[in-house]
Image: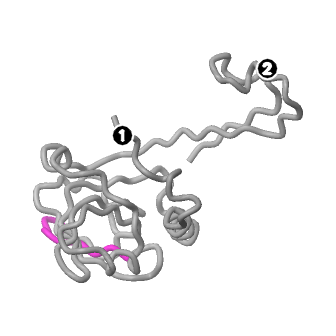
Amino acid sequence: FWLKQWKSREQLPSTWPAATSTAEPLAAMVAMDVDTSAAVDMQALAALQVGGRVNFGLFQQAAVGSTLRVGGRVTELQAGAQVCTITTADGGSVQVAVGDVPLTGLAAGTFVEAVGTKAGEAELRAVGFYTFPGSAEADAELWDEAVKLAQLPQLRELFLPIQV
């Protein structure tokens, strides 16, 4: 992840309301540019509802057939395999059926977000994987805390998908 920090209003893009605001002081504003790579079955992904991000504990509570996004580290992946294992950010283990998803760029140790439907108690039928630069150094504990925060009633609205 790359973070850009602006220390004054003059450095902000002119289209941002804060750039023309007279409120002081501007301590710091942060924008995040995230480069991702994806291995996705686009037709299958388009057919799904937007899934919520879950850790293993929340995954187990979800109903079979629910659309979910599971973050974790690929721990088992063999060439040509139709299944891989992801150790979730909270330490659980999910078997992921990859189906028609191309596994380009995935390797053991890569931190990914797998998108798909829950197929069993610890099974996900994936339609896509998203990886991030520097994923080998990804902070799984921080990811897990963000997932937990998104479940709090006070913050849940901030993490819901935007309706278009």
In this view, 140 is above or below 56: above
Could you tell me residue 140's position as x and y percent?
52, 69
Residue 10 got which mark?
Answer: 2
Residue 150 got which mark?
Answer: none
- Separation of marks 1 and 2 at Cα, in angstroms: 33 Å
Q: Residue furthest front?
A: 153
Residue 10 is at least partly visible in this image: yes
Q: Is residue 162 left or right of residue 101?
A: right
**Regarding mark 1 in the picture, which secondary structure is present there?**
loop
The amino acid beneath tag 2 is Glu
* Rendered residue at 33%/73% (across/down): 86
Q: Check if residue 82 falls in the magenta segment.
A: yes
Q: Callout 1: 10 Å neighbours few (<14), some, many (20+)?
A: few
Q: Is residue 123 left or right of residue 62?
A: left
Q: Check if residue 70 falls in the magenta segment.
A: no
The magenta segment: 78-87
In this view, 49 is above or below 92: above
**Regarding mark 2 in the picture, which secondary structure is present there?**
helix
Residue tagged by mark 1? 163
Q: Quadrant of residue 4?
A: top right
Q: Is residue 46 left or right of residue 158?
A: left
* Rendered residue at 20%/51% (across/down): 48
* Rendered residue at 24%/77% (across/down): 95
The amino acid beneath tag 1 is Gln
Could you tell me residue 101's position as x and y percent?
17, 55
Number of numbered discs on residues: 2
Residue 139 is at least partly visible in this image: no
For the C terminus, which image quadrant? Answer: top left
Could you tell me residue 152's position as x and y percent?
54, 67
